[in-house]
Image (cartoon, coloured by chain):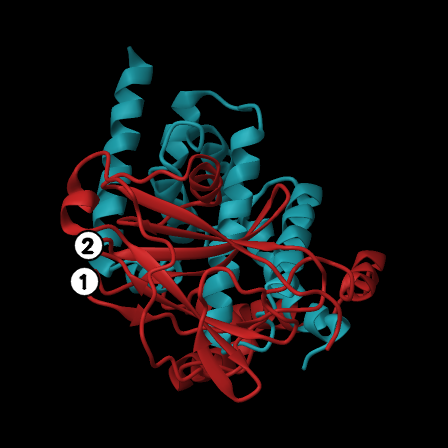
Chain colours: A red, B cyan
Amino acid sequence: MNGHPSFLQLDRLALGSADPQVAAHVGSCETCRAQLSRVQQAPPIPAWVGDLRSAKSSRRTWWAGSVGALAAIGLVLMIASPRRGPDGDPGAKGAPSVAVYVKRGDVVSLWDGRAPFAPGDALRLKISPQGFGRVAVASLQGDTITELYAAPVTAHGESVLPPSWTLDGTPGPDVLLLVFSHAPLSEDGLRWASAGLPRTSEVWATRLALTKSGGDR
Amino acid sequence: MVDVEAAYRRYFPLIREKCRRMLSDLAEADDAAQETFVRLWRARLRDSDPRRLTAWIYRTSTRIAIDRLRKRAARMSMDEALDRLAFIPSGPDEALAVRRALELVSRTLPATEVEIAVLHRLDGLTQAEIADVAEISARTVRRFLERLDKRVEKLRKENAL
């Protein structure tokens, strides 16, 4: 890089989060200042951006960003327990599982696998990877897969995933895909996992269909 | 809460620059940038910590670009592509050559290796930064890059036969 910071560092600086050394370098480097200027130059707003705003209330994207931690304490019901481990490994060690915690108002409870959710419910996932080193969470909307979270996880024991998500008011069940793996998965990999729900020693996937009671509260 | 127009003004320029580094066709790069921004908006990540958000943008836009690269027809010979992938570009012309090379090898190499190749060869990320973005260890990144070099060399030999 000839002493220049990477594009990633410059982009982080543009968003207000950077190493002071990067900021100092940009102050004295015309090339990097020019790059920074390009990514800080506000473009005209195209029509499709307005479409995103108007689609906000009707689209089926219900997973919101972090809304604060849930006190995920209580008994763990393994909602997505495997029945098999075709290659032996997961089955032999016990297969991955996931529990869903629901925060409604000030009350946190463990989802029983059947009760409908309500708009405004905040969800958080507790997982038991059983030897897998990564987890990916995605929402499925027709043919669209949106990765919500992907990260390395502690392979053994249980852990609560950092993000929580809030259900919106659109009616109908929403589908969540969870994939445990050893290596990061591309979008094609997630699509493949969603289609086949593999349960092997390499990849283990499950879907959660979350039914909502519907209507606004 | 950031509204969609504010989010667009804040994030789209850097997403577009990232996509233009990966895709030689400007219109396609802008399409990839639009797809990345739409996903960002729908995933409601726009209020996230900048480090986490930029990592997500790099990861997601790279995967979107790779999908597009794989759907394209090759526009250069394998020989030429492998030669171009052997170095990190130092200017716009060389970057264009690497982009075209990636179009070709993206059909042959595993997606993860192409993703790391993009982050390393086109974005100029360090191994530690790639590890941050791709959410893998620096050791794994180093292993992937070594494997990439070996695969490129192997493809080069096969193509020479």
Q: Which residue is mark 2?
A: A131
Q: Do the numbered discs 2 and 1 sit on residues whose CB atoms are within 8 Å?
A: yes
Q: Please state the horizontal and vertical placement of residue A162, each as a whole percent of the image.
A: 40, 74
Residue A83, compared with residue A165, is above or below; it is above
Chain under callout 1: A
Instruction: Evaluate whether label 2 is on the same chain as label 1.
Output: yes
Measuring 53% from the left and 61% from the top, which residue is drawn there? B57
Residue A23, compared with residue A97, is above or below; it is below
Measuring 31% from the left and 57% from the top, which residue is drawn there? A97
Q: Which residue is mark 1?
A: A156
For residue A156, side relative to residue B68 (left or right):
left
Measuring 78% from the left and 66% from the top, which residue is drawn there? A57
Sequence-first tag of 2 and 1:
2
- In depth, the one of B34 and B25 nearer the eye is B34
- Going by the numbered disc 2, the residue's amino acid type is Gly
For residue A170, side relative to residue B69 (left or right):
right
For residue A98, side relative to residue B59 (left or right):
left
Residue A12, compared with residue B81, is above or below; it is below
- In depth, the one of B161 and A76 nearer the eye is A76
For residue B95, side relative to residue B31 (left or right):
left
User: Could you say which quadrant of the image residue A186 lies in?
Assistant: top left
